[in-house]
Image (cartoon, rainbow, N blue to C red):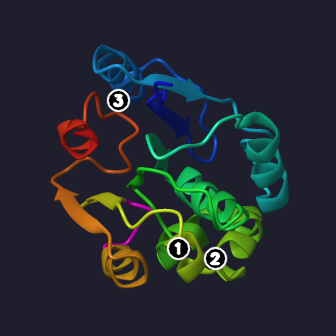
Amino acid sequence: MKITKKIYLIHGWGGTDSSEGWFGWLKKKAKEKGFEVISFNMPNTDEPVIEEWINFLKENIKELNEETYFIGHSIGCQAILRYLETLDLNIKIKGSIFVAPWMKLDKNTIEEEGEEVIEIARPWMETPINFEKIKKHTKNFLCILSDNDPYVPLFNKEFFEEKLGAKSVIKNNEEHFNETQKIPEILEFLK
């Protein structure tokens, strides 16, 4: 029986299952490479809550195997990590790619955004993650950051390298990748 190559694509805070920008580009290119690409409109996207997002993924992800990749943007990366943490230890996947991932946000930026943003972000920043359990599912991680991201400080690179052994790429002038049209490093990693 042939194993289906799948990508689960998880958007960020305030995002959607978009076909624009690098999401649309990735969907097209990945399909050309024989992947089935599944993306969702995550619940309550403007005020993301850990439990809602993880329960949504549990309900909607139907098949995982050693040819499955997860690709996330921004808070979607944390949603992937927190979802992987809930899986049975015998489940193996191919890998995960994190675009503009964060465990901590830029303090000045979130203060500028206001108290409401701080309250939404706080559980995501303070609720622990069991990285050792996550690495039982795969040891294949890529972290892509921008040198001028207004939300995600570059120290997140060291965090992901240390906790997951992630490979890292720092792109120039891509900000939070919201306007980015393509990220070739993703396709390289999928080989």
Q: Residue at x 51, y 78 (%)?
A: 107
Q: CA distance from mark 1 to mark 2?
A: 6 Å
What residue did someone put label 2 on? 125
Q: Give the mark, 1 or 2, whose residue is nearer the N terminus.
A: 1
Q: Which residues are magenta?
A: 150-154
Question: At which x and y percent is residue 12?
Answer: 57, 46
Crowding near pointer 2: few (<14 within 10 Å), some, many (20+)?
Answer: some
Check the image and report above or below for 122 versus 93. Answer: below
Q: CA distance from mark 1 to mark 3?
A: 22 Å
What residue did someone put label 1 on? 103
Q: CA distance from mark 3 to mark 2?
A: 26 Å
Which quarter of the rendered picture does the C terminus lie within?
top left
Mark 1 vs 2: CB contact within 8 A: yes
Q: Main secondary structure of the magenta part?
A: loop
Mark 1 vs 3: CB contact within 8 A: no
Q: Residue at x 76, y 54 (%)?
A: 54
Could you tell whether 89 is left or right of 37 in the image?
Answer: right
Crowding near pointer 3: few (<14 within 10 Å), some, many (20+)?
Answer: some
- Kindly identify the amino acid type of the residue bearing the numbered disc 2: Met
Instruction: Work out whether residue 24 or residue 108 is closer to the camera in this orientation and state it.
Output: 24
Q: Is residue 21 visible?
A: yes
